[in-house]
Structure formats: C-alpha cells, structure tokens
Amino acid sequence: MIHDNPHMFSDGDVRTVLARRSHNREELSRDGIHFRWKPLRWIPRQGTELWVAVGRSNRHGFVVALHETKDNEEYVLASSLIIWDNPAPIALAYREGHRDQVFWAPCWGCRDGGTIEWDDAKNEVIITHRW
C-alpha cells in the first residue's frame, strides 16, 4: 500500500504537527517530551532493539516498527499501521524515562494518533490508533 513513492517526513513536518495545536517544541523538550521525524532506535526492554519510523507514500501515511537483522542493511517487519488516504505529516514522540512507549501523532495533544508499545506477554510490538 505504500510502494508509490514512500519517504520519511521532515523536520518542517514536525513543526507542522506541533503548530496544529500551538505547541512549542522547546517547551515540550524541557518537560521531557521529544519529537522526531527520522527513524528512531527504540529499546523497549533490555535485549530488544527496534527501529520505529513514520512516513508517507503518495496516498497513505504509515507507522512502522522493524527488527534490524543485519547491521544497517536488513530489517524484518515487527508491526505496521497504514493510515489510508491521509498522507498528512506525522511525528514520533517519546518521554524521557519511559522507554516502553513511543507516540505517533498528526498533532500533539489532539485525539488523533496513537502509540507504539512492547507487549511482554506476547513478545511483540503493538501499534495502536486512538480513533
């Protein structure tokens, strides 16, 4: 679904995400909340490393979590979510000291978006959507 021109968002897209609710990136950073547009190396628990990313194709947005199988060369899908017919900017966010959860959002502080979480019981990544 995302093979037509897939690419990551940009830092300007993160500014757009924050501007939708008039949030200031520096103030949120002082509160321990950080935003990314580039893929984020996520270690939800000791011994588990993943890459999480947000991006878009010509028609759809996506959130993806990948296991790295060969250093910077090969990856295996852990979990994904496609946001149908909505390629609007999405940002990744995380809270300092809370490594068990990463957030994705088209605007910070709104009801849209969701989480990327590690489920210890199932030993898997779960991407949620709050809609």
Image (cartoon, helix red, strand yellow):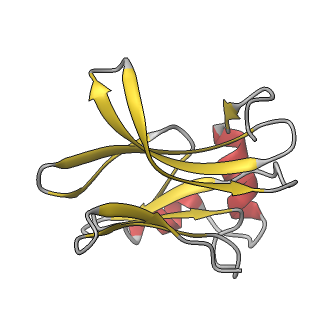
Residue at x 57% of width, y 43% of height: 37
Residue 129 percent coordinates (x, y): 62, 73
Residue at x 32% of width, y 33% of height: 68
Could one spot residue 80 in this view of the protein? yes
Q: Residue furthest left?
A: 46
Q: Is residue 40 left or right of residue 58?
A: left
Q: Is residue 74 left or right of residue 91?
A: left
The relative height of residue 48 versus residue 123 in the rendered view (above or below) is above
Q: Is residue 7 left or right of residue 77?
A: right
Instruction: From the viewer's side, name the closer residue of 8 and 29.
Output: 8
Instruction: From the viewer's side, name the closer residue of 38 and 71.
Output: 71
The relative height of residue 59 versus residue 44 in the rendered view (above or below) is above
Residue 48 percent coordinates (x, y): 20, 50
Residue 60 percent coordinates (x, y): 80, 47
Image quadrant where residue 74 sits: top left
In the rendered view of the protein, which quadrant contains the N terminus? top right
